[in-house]
Amino acid sequence: MLKIENLQARIEEKEILKGINLEIKPGEIHAIMGPNGSGKSTLASVLAGREDYEVTGGSVDFLGKDLLEMSPEDRAKEGLFLAFQYPVEIPGVSTTNFIKTAVNEKRKYLGQEPLDAAQFLKTMKEKMKLVEIDQSLLSRSLNEGFSGGEKKRNEIFQMAMLEPKLAILDETDSGLDIDALRIVANGVNQLRSKDNAFLVVTHYQRLLDYIVPDFVHVLYKGRIVRSGTKELALELEEKGYDFIKAELEKETV
Amino acid sequence: MEVINNLTKAFASQENPSSPLHEFQSDNWKTFAGLGLPAIKHEEWKYTRIRNAYADNLVIATDAQLSAATLSAHQLPGTDHANRIVFLNGRYQAGLSSFQDDSASLVVKPLETAAGDEDAEFVNLHLGHSQKYHPDGINALNAAFAAGGVYIRVNKGKSLNQPVVIYHFTDSSNGYAFSQPRILVNAAEASAASIMETYVNIGGGESLTNEVIEICAAQDAVLHYVKIQNEGAKSSHSGTTHIRQLGKCLTHAVTLTLSGKLVRNNLNMVMEAEHGESHMYGLYLLNGDTLADNHTIVDNAMPHCFSNELYKGILDEQSTGVFNGKIFVRKDAQKTNAYQSNKNILLGDHASANTKPQLEIFADDVKCSHGCTIGKLDEDALFYLKARGISEQKAKALLLHAFAIDILDQIQHEAIREYADKLISERLSFDF
Ligand SMILES: Nc1ncnc2c1ncn2[C@@H]1O[C@H](COP(=O)(O)OP(=O)(O)O)[C@@H](O)[C@H]1O
Ligand SMILES: [Mg+2]
């Protein structure tokens, strides 16, 4: 589904991604962990098409297409979804209208009829239940005045509405209490199928108790320095990131 | 200058010594003759070369004919039942005007008539008050031609069922046409009214409007005012909306500027009574070579008044937005609350915005705030929308519409609000 080869990116002359290799197959859940500042959000942003980052090398293949050649909006319509670490507040834009527009733009792109008001409402009701989100939130301006948890839940709700093939969750767990965490994880687990995949970026192992990954990667200073199964996450939790740093230093000596 | 000669001739030909406005008009003509047209060296006219609009080929339009078909073609949607006041080439057209509210609530007559009947005292007291705030040549020039104006009275204790929509037609089919509408409004004690103005250039040529509307709101009155400017790129405009609060009351103004060549709006809220409340909102959505200059004044003379002001600009291509917001708090006006904000989004690389708040505060116990921003569209918001599959063009339209909506929301009349929203949505290619 997604094949990243030797991906390098920088922002304002600063090298951040220094050669990322990662392959994700349909049905898989991958977790990326790593200390703050290691480049996790940068990777997520580069995949979603944020123009502030300059890709200086490597390639990304998404479902047989050159992802890096596509506009952010086309990436989304092809089935990529990024749940933002910091969802943006947009006053004056109704959450419901925004989601309806997004859903119908994607349908148009895929050659499908737009959803009419009734169909849209029905789908919305279903998905609202899935992520336990309240109607009152959706009739407000997009993310405006939402609490941290509400913003994250809104991201998962949008994901549920857009049914992406590959969803990248950037620290969707940070700032969530255990109930919210469970709800988010529950949403992901219910949306999970053999045809889609998830890339879960997290700083803590906690989320992985609820969303069980097939693979865990450790990103450090712009490189994936370890890959393994979910046991790697447990080991990290136990020993902390310092142990990776120490090991890496030993290796480079 | 040929234009001055033409104006002089036009003034002389309409002089009528038996008119009750004669003295007012000729005094003002003398003032105009002394001051001339404002030049950009005047601080107040720094960005707006209004002199250029007074070109030698300006035709002081004489009454043309306006067909019923033209009139109805330009009627604002949803206002079939509104009170309608029609001006043509700056002169009130009683025959084309029509009223839904009865005369117990609403009285409309030529200003010249009002100056000689039971309303004479009011006219003498209030006509020309705006000159105190705008002692310039063009205010005087308008006053010199005041006989073509209209007087509007909303009677004591009466709430109008329908808005008063004022249509200003300028017929430019015979050349560069000049209109000078004059309006005096008497919103009596505990009355409620909504007044709207809109401008239409018919004939396809160039036009210039130089307007003065003076509104007096008495104790407990509620007055809503909306000005919609969308005359097209060949039309210039300078207009003063002077609102005077005579007693504790609520006055509320919304100014929308969507097109024009050179546009200057003066809006004054003169708060002469305690506990007055005023609101001023504006949106200028410009493209091409349009320059729109909004000068506002809030004058607090008495304590415990509240004013809120928000002007927003979206400037595309090489358009220019100018905002100047003065707030005076006189020494007796303790406990004044005055808020002002001006926000601009520059879309075009050659667009520009000039914004200047001017607070002059002579009382010590007041709350005043002002702020202004000039920026681009929020890149983070744009990316967020695009990352959900919304095209760049649609995402921009969505954000700009969201930016504009809180001004549009201030228009109380639903049909007019929807009409304004439609105009703006079309301009932004916003179709959600
Ligand atoms: N917009 C930016 N401008 C400059 N440096 C940035 C910017 N965004 C991220 N960085 C830097 O890139 C590095 C990686 O950041 P980020 O991808 O956010 O890490 P993570 O998500 O793993 O915490 C950090 O050193 C950060 O300071
Ligand atoms: Mg991050």
Image (cartoon, coloured by chain):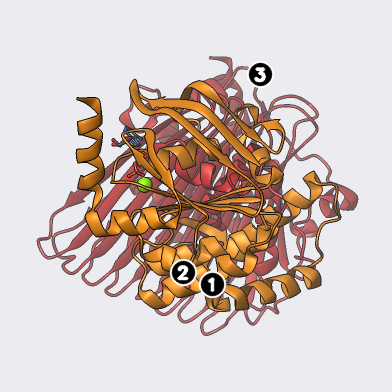
Chain colours: A orange, B red
User: What residue is pinned by disc 3?
Assistant: B57
Q: Tell me the quarter of the picture where residue B322 sits.
A: top left
Q: Tell me the quarter of the picture where residue A207 sits.
A: bottom left
Instruction: Identify residue type, mark 2.
Output: Tyr
Q: Is residue B427 left or right of residue A223?
A: right
| Cβ atoms at labels 2 and 3 below 8 Å apart | no
Q: Is residue B342 left or right of residue A112?
A: left
Instruction: Identify residue type, mark 1.
Output: Asn
Foreground: A96 or A21?
A: A21
**Mark 2 or mark 1: whose residue is earlier in sequence:** 1
Give me the C-alpha separation between circle 2 and circle 1: 8 Å
Foreground: B196 or B246?
A: B196
Q: SS of the residue at dot 1? A: helix
Q: Is residue B15 left or right of residue B274?
A: right
Q: Is residue B168 above or below residue A249?
A: below
Foreground: A150 or A22?
A: A22
Which residue is pictured at 64% across the width and 45% down the height?
A: A76
| Cβ atoms at labels 3 and 1 below 8 Å apart | no
